[in-house]
Amino acid sequence: MNNKELITSVAMKMNITKSETQELLDSFLECCISQLKEGNSIGFQSFGVFDVVKRVERVSVHPSTKKRSLIPPKLVLNFKQSLILKEKINTKL
C-alpha cells in the first residue's frame, strides 16, 4: 500500500475528504518524526513500538576489492511488533 492508497482507504472508512485525510496523515507523521528526533519511542497498542537506536562505528570490507572502509556511527529506526499484531498476521497461515 502506498501513500495515495492509504489516504483513499482512510478517507472512505472515516467518511471525510481526501484532502482532510492528507492533512491528518501529514500532521500525524510530523508528530511521530519530531518525537523520534528527540530520542523518544512511539508505541501503538496492539501494533508495536518504534524507537531510534544508535549503530556503532564499524569497518566494512568490499568483497571484490578487499578494500576496507570505516562506516561512521548513525541512528537507525527500530520496530518491535506487539504480540497481538504477530498473532493477527500469523492466523492467515
Image (cartoon, rainbow, N blue to C red):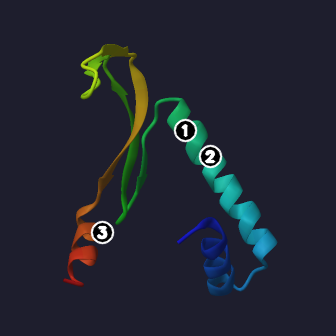
Name the amino acid type tagged 1.
Gln
Please rate how many residues cluster around mark 2, counting C-alpha atoms within 10 Å: few if below 14, some from 14 to 19, many from 20: few
**Residue type marked 3:** Leu
Q: Nearer the viewer, residue 63 or 75?
A: 63
**Residue that mark 1 sits on:** 35
Disc 2, disc 1: CB below 8 Å? yes
Marks counted in the figure total 3
Apparent side of residue 33 relative to residue 12 in the rendered image (left or right): left
Q: CA distance from mark 2 to mark 1?
A: 6 Å
CA gap, disc 3 and disc 1? 23 Å
Amino acid type of the residue that numbered disc 2 sits on in the rendered structure? Cys
Q: Quadrant of the C terminus?
A: bottom left
Residue linked to disc 2: 31
Earlier sequence position, callout 3 versus callout 1: 1
Q: Which residue is found at the position 37% from the left and 63% from the top? A: 47
Q: Nearer the viewer, residue 9 or 60?
A: 60
SS assignment at label 2: helix
Residue beneath disc 3 = 85
